[in-house]
Amino acid sequence: MEVDGCRMRYLRAGSGPPLILLHGLLGYSFSWRFTIPALAPYATVYAPDLLGAGFSDRAFTLDHSMRAIAKRVVRFAEKLNLASLDLLGTSHGGGVAKMAAEEFLAPESKVRLNRLVLVAPVNPYSSHGSWLAPFFGTPLGAALFRLTIPRMTFLFPYWHQRMYGDPDHIPPGTFEGYTAPLAIPGLFEHGLNIVRTWKRDLAELETVLPKLASVPTLLIWGSADPAVYASSARPLAKFFPNSRTLIFDGVGHLPYEECPEKFNRALIEFLTTTPVPAQTV
């Protein structure tokens, strides 16, 4: 699909109420390889490679702040001619999902948001990453990143396995799948574009959260998440009075990969049993 003058790849599967899945930083639709088949009998699932990631155009000249990405998610849904949808976002994609939720709730929105699922979403209440991501967004940090990370892709398995509570649960083919988009130059530069607005994005998220109280929400975390601490689930949940919080014991940042059966079961239960609030006029 063409979005903002660039080609955005997405996967589509299943039939039923629309569900859009938003991946995290430097992830792509591959992240949902266990989720899509499980959800397909219950929903029409759309999993985009957000612009700059996966096998979509790198789109270097576009704004990659959370707000700009959220607006592209809205345009994606509009181009699909969706009247309503459920929205799931993980990690950085969870931050984008919150901003997209605000956009969908606007009176002039053409698409109605039914339910929201946030999987270890970036939020202002997790101290981890509060200095590292903004540092890489500075000229000095970006220069150090460019000098080191793209030349050390052999360390990717080490960094990725740290995202798991138990590295023995890393599915076969994971490293190969996540490194495949490196064949298209510019993936790491895209990451720098995202962290450049990190502090501003977190500040804006604080203003967004009070506006999402009406949305039925499922919060999912792993207790051993090293990237977005599970302790931030409680202060975040206060903004969602109609929410459930599910924390998988001993699981890391990627529960949809580390314990996919439990994750999918919880997701299906939420999407199929949680009523949608009546639409106000």
Image (spheres, grey):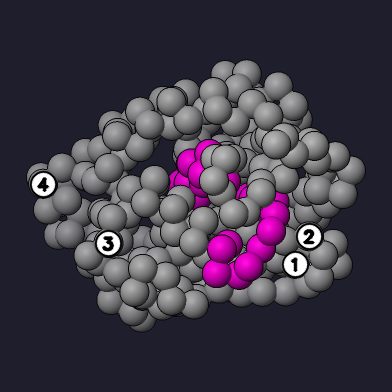
Range of residues picked out in magenta: 77-104
Q: Residues within 10 Å of mark 4 (few under 14, many from 20)?
A: few
Q: Residue furthest right?
A: 273
In the rendered structure, find residue 62 and report the number of the disc placed on it: 3
Q: Residues within 10 Å of mark 1 (few under 14, many from 20)?
A: some
Q: Are marks 4 and 2 in contact (CB under 8 Å)?
A: no
Work out whether mark 4 precedes mark 2 in sequence or the reverse, and give the earlier one.
2
In the rendered structure, find residue 139 and report the number of the disc placed on it: 4
Residue at image position (62%, 54%) is: 111
Work out whether mark 3 precedes mark 1 in sequence or the reverse, and give the earlier one.
1
Q: Are marks 4 and 1 in contact (CB under 8 Å)?
A: no
The residue under label 1 is 44
Give the spatial CA distance, label 4 vs label 3.
19 Å
Asked if residue 14 shows in the view, the reply is yes
Give the spatial CA distance, label 4 vs label 1.
42 Å
**Pair 4/1: label in front:** 1
Give the spatial CA distance, label 4 vs label 2.
44 Å
Kind of residue at disc 4: Pro
Residue at image position (48%, 41%) is: 99
Quarter location, residue 247: top right
Give the spatial CA distance, label 2 vs label 3.
31 Å
Residue 98 colored in magenta in the image: yes
Kind of residue at disc 2: Pro
Quarter location, residue 12: bottom right
**Pair 4/3: label in front:** 3
Apparent side of residue 34 relative to residue 64 in the rendered image (left or right): right
The residue under label 2 is 17
